Image (spheres, rainbow, N blue to C red):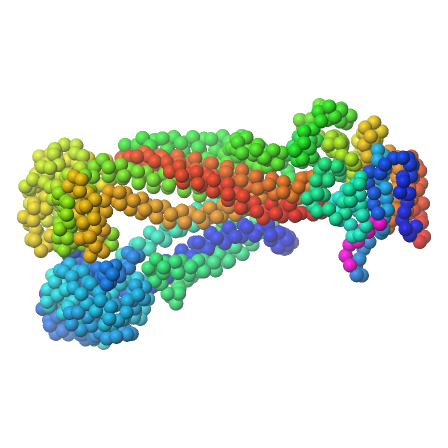
Amino acid sequence: MTVLKTSLRNFVAHKGRMALSAIAVLLSVAFVCGTLVFTDTTNATFDKLFASTASDVSVSPKGVSDKDTRQGRVRTLPGSELAQLKRIDGVKSVTGDATSQSVTVVNSKGDSIGPSSGAPTVGTNWDTTEHRSVKITSGHSPRGPTEVMVDADTADTKKLKLGDSLRIIAVPGEFRAKIVGIATFQVTNPGATLVYMDTATAQRKLLGKPGVYSNYALTAQPGVSNDQLKKSVVAELGTGVKVQTKAEASKEAESDIGSFLDVMKYAMLGFAGIAVLVGIFLIVNTFSMLVAQRTREIGLMRAIGSSRKQINRSVLLEALLLGIVGSILGVLGGVGLAVGLMKIMGNAGLHLSTDQLTVKPATPIVGLTIGIVVTVIAAYIPARRAGKISPMAALRDAGTPADTKAGRIRGAIGTLLTAGGAAALVVAGNADKAVDGSMFLGLGVVLTLIGFIVIGPLLAGLVVRALATVVLRMFGPVGRLAERNALRNPRRTGATGAALMIGLALVACLSVVGSSMVASASDELDKSVGADFIIQSDTGQPITQQIEQATHRAKGLTHVSDRKEIEGAKITLPDGRTATEDLAAADPTYADDLRTPVVSGDLAAAYGKDAMSVPEGFAKKHKVKEGDTLTVAFKEGRTAKLKVAAITADDTSLDKGALYTNITTVERYVPANLIPADIMLLAQAKDGQEAVAYKSLKAELHLYPSVKVRDQTDYKKEMKNQIGQLLNLVYGLLALAIIVAILGVVNTLALSVVERTREIGLMRAIGLSRRQMRRMIRLESVVIALFGALLGLGLGMGWGATAQKLLALEGLKTLEIPWPTIITVFIGSAVVGLIAALIPAFRAARMNILNAIATD
Amino acid sequence: MTTAVSIPKTGGSGGHTAVAARARQVVKAYGSGETRVVALDHVDVDIARGRFTAIMGPSGSGKSTLMHCLAGLDTVSSGQIFIDETEITGLKDKKLTQLRRDRVGFIFQAFNLLPTLNAIENITLPMDIAGRKPDRAWLDRVVQTVGLADRLKHRPNQLSGGQQQRVAVARALAARPEIIFGDEPTGNLDSRAGAEVLGFLKRSVDELGQTIVMVTHDPVAASYADRVLYLADGRIVDEMHSPTAELVLERMKSFDARGRVS
């Protein structure tokens, strides 16, 4: 009982000193809970959307695939089934849908009104009978070939109103129409753009044929289960179509979204985990310092008969209290964070409603468990140390026990781990196979990280002294005092710096890999891309006939090469086994536009009649030699016998692993209407006419905002931007861990100031000015931050360079160290050190001298 | 003694000796209204230059407060304090800090040294902070005087209590301040180590011409001084020149007795 009381009193008495630790727990737990709440809410939103839009039973063509949109393939049902379906027992109603996602809708200025978030633009027929999820809120339903209706969210964000004219670009062709109605979703629409037209228009303009449908939606009569109805439908239509119940359709749709959300969830939880790890350092430091400051008190407790266990337990109890308080606040913070995240995502185009905020019981349980367990574990070592304090300590003059012994064993273990990690990294860098290499890379990263953490206190001594000679000596005696202070407790400095090291190491590693990716791709682009222009869709829309024609109309071009992807060709190999691969069908000029190196044969020959090329890896795996003939069964066509005319090298990053063949070859085996649209066009300008051609291409393709024309410079820039954005996202997530580490620096300084109250009083008494006092603490802070930064950046660059060396096998051939980023981070760390010291320095400078000297 | 004036302005003993520090009608009070406690009650005092002055009095007499106010470590409620001809009452923190750094030396009862600096670094710290080069010859002489020549590279935790206080004395002397204040500088030492430190203080006054003011409650310590001031209830109630331990003790006893009857 008394143990609990002492713990409680201590906790309350030192709540200021606990505040930063509590914030660290809070932040980590909030991030975990926020992630869970956000993904649960997103899932719930999609569940509701699918539940409200899916029909009891749906009928769709077989073979529908994700790639259809990109390949401009419109799969339809002939329309004759409608009457058949209506006759089935148990059917209440049937509607035919004419829906396509291969649609780009453009406003009068020529800009796409589609979502920028990656959500689809959906063109569909408006059927008055069966629309539970959408309501017309303004205007009327579309009638005739020149009227459309759009959804309210899109009208809102893209500033569309009744009477506006739109251009709708679909696979069969394009047409113009006026907005006559606006429809509002009755459930949350997370971001798709919807354009409605009447059924006849949708059939002709979107699906390309009057009377056809993309799918049918059936409603069951009361008392008829969806499964029963499905059975009846299958009995009626046979197995030539895909029949799904509502549950099956929803599940399929959810699994697509769900897997994306899972990736996001685990990525974010991973970053939360890093923050938790960093928070541990902060908590360890806090409790170590509290125990050190309380040595006399603990000695007294021991002297009057408290057992080691009791002392140990009382410290752990305090940690438990801290964990509980921090975690509860963290769970609440997590809900707030999720709401904030939903707002941010709203701006990015993923609309979620707070009405559907989903907090599952698991969320607070997970949050509290993590927060409490981590805090108690982190406090365990300091608690044990507290238990070991001898009763004699009560009599000793308090002061702070010197903790200069970093320990030889510790140094040996740390050095061993680091050396082992370094060896693993060397092995990884020289690995022949990426798979083995990545295992060693992982091992090396973990070992060097742990090694650095373990020898942190030893490194602190070295690095701080080195930094001191470079930086601190400029500041004279104040600098020297700061240096000594940073060195007086290497374990503490080491732990504080290590916390910062973790986040910065990841930043450095990723920035090295990212910039190496850009540099490698740029080099490769310079080396192997002969094409001047690349025409591609960033939104996954097909390159339609019209776009292809427009490209050909451009002036100043020598040629335009088409590049298609032929899905799922079944290849029978020489040894009789089969492999299913996608073929890259292109024009022969493509070999000029993208000069893929060959290990044997001639790439141009692969574009000959009934010829193809295979990549090196494929050839090795399946024992295919140049000159072999492969039997290729096209998924939507006949079977061909193709001769392997070239084997391409694998160490490339563009079109890696492509099996090339000529489009004309494919055309002989696959019916013209089943050949997919181009996924990319490459074009070459006549000598000296590059500028003219570029301008002309832009002008011709201006009408088609779904595709982008890029010359090599644009392409490099785009690539750099994309990788830059990805890196920024990751840096943003790592910011959490770095913020916790900065709190750690503040915490260490704040507690040091408390611990050194008497010294501060003494220094002020003998003439250290307030300004000098502040500077001394700021310098100490800067040195700790720079120590962490130096370790982190060094470690991270090592990891990054190893990863690059390993991935050189996969085309990441150029190592580029992003010095501007590295230097910015280093200088930024110094600034962070300054900021972290603001409050502690202010407090130290303001201390009353006499009170300070008189403190115990 | 309601006015609490104990010495004439021109100095008691020497007459021609200049004044290193003086207090005029200094009041120091804590709190207000009914809880008001007066620590110093209109104190006038002159500290003679080149002399060793001890301030004595029972606990709560205000002796430490007086010293802190004279040294510019504490502010006064009213009245004036001068170090030499500089009025320090009303000075801003910056000027006060400079004054302490350049013109005043301190020796505290305990915890005088920075644990991160070795002995010589501690000794030269005030000059380092001020950005001044120590006077080598003088520094050597001070170090010799306090007998620390072979301990200069030691950290405070490697020194005994007496050695630590000697380092503190050396630090106070090294910068050649106009005046040194000691707050029970031997309070934590055994009698032998205490005697050593007091001997150094006395020698620095006699041989080096230093001015020292020391607060103490130990009659033996006070006997090293040239002059002893007695404080009671925030007022200076008596003084004694060329004291001996017996005389001081005697005088203290009489105050105690008086305090009890009144």
Q: Is residue A279 magenta?
A: no
- Whether residue A211 appears in this view of the structure is yes
Viewport quadrant of the N terminus of chain A: bottom right
Question: Which corner quadrant of the image does residue B57 belong to?
Answer: top right
Secondary structure mostly seen in magenta is strand
| Relative image position of residue A252 (x, y in whole percent) | 25, 59
| Relative image position of residue A414 (x, y in whole percent) | 48, 33
In the picture provided, is A50 more to the left or to the right than A855?
left
| Relative image position of residue A175 (x, y in whole percent) | 16, 64
Most foreground residue, A234 or A768 = A768
Most foreground residue, B201 or A810 = B201
In percent of the image, x 47 and y 42: which residue is there? A828
Number of numbered discs present? 0
Question: Which corner quadrant of the image does residue B32 belong to?
Answer: bottom right
Viewport quadrant of the C terminus of chain A: top right
In the picture provided, is A851 more to the left or to the right than A834?
right
Q: Over which residues does the magenta segment extend?
A: B25-32
Most foreground residue, A162 or B69 = A162
- Whether residue A55 appears in this view of the structure is no
